[in-house]
Image (cartoon, rainbow, N blue to C red):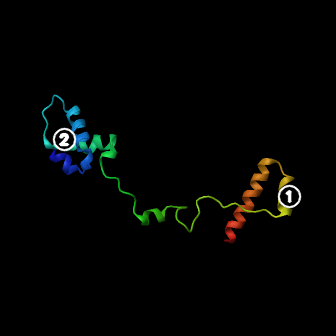
Amino acid sequence: MRQIDQSGVLPAAKEDALRRLEQHFADQETDAVAVRSHLDRTVRGQAPHLWPQTPPPAAELRSQPGAGPDKPRRPQPVALTAAQEAEAMKLPPAQRLTYYRERQQEAQERR
């Protein structure tokens, strides 16, 4: 049980971790090193919910591209003028989409 405590398993998950160890080492003699190694290498990968989940630091979230309030993740919709809409409607659907995305990009660059 000391190896479970030392590995950082959540208090509510200690029984689950103990059952997993008992199942793995059913008929074997164990030592602290083998138990700790199995916890860290196998059980942690199979059952990460037994350990505390730490959210990434806020600075790390801000450094991700497209994240944060100053950088929207998706392109914002753009309202076409009547002339632009009429021009777009003359195009086939695939080219119409390209035309709209170009107008969207222009609007985004102006912001």
Residue at 85% across / 53% down in the picture? Answer: 89
User: Residue 29: where, in percent of width, then height?
Assistant: 12, 33
Left of 53 or right of it: where is 11? left
Lower sequence index among marks 2 and 1: 2
Which residue position is annotated with label 2? 35
Which residue position is annotated with label 1? 87
**Mark 1: which amino acid?**
Glu
Q: Front-most of 2 and 110?
A: 2
- Whether 23 is drawn above or below 106: the answer is above
Within 10 Å of disc 1 (Cα), the crowding (few <14, some 14-19, many 20+) is: few
User: Residue 5: where, in percent of width, then height?
Assistant: 19, 49
Helix, strand or loop for disc 1: helix
Q: Front-most of 33 and 1?
A: 1
Residue at 20% across / 46% down in the picture? Answer: 4
Residue at 47% across / 64% down in the picture? Answer: 63
Image quarter of the C terminus = bottom right
Q: Front-most of 1 and 96?
A: 1
User: Residue 7: where, in percent of width, then height?
Assistant: 22, 49
Helix, strand or loop for disc 2: helix
CA separation in Å, label 2 and label 1: 70 Å
- Locate residue 102: give its quadrant: bottom right
**Mark 2: which amino acid?**
Val
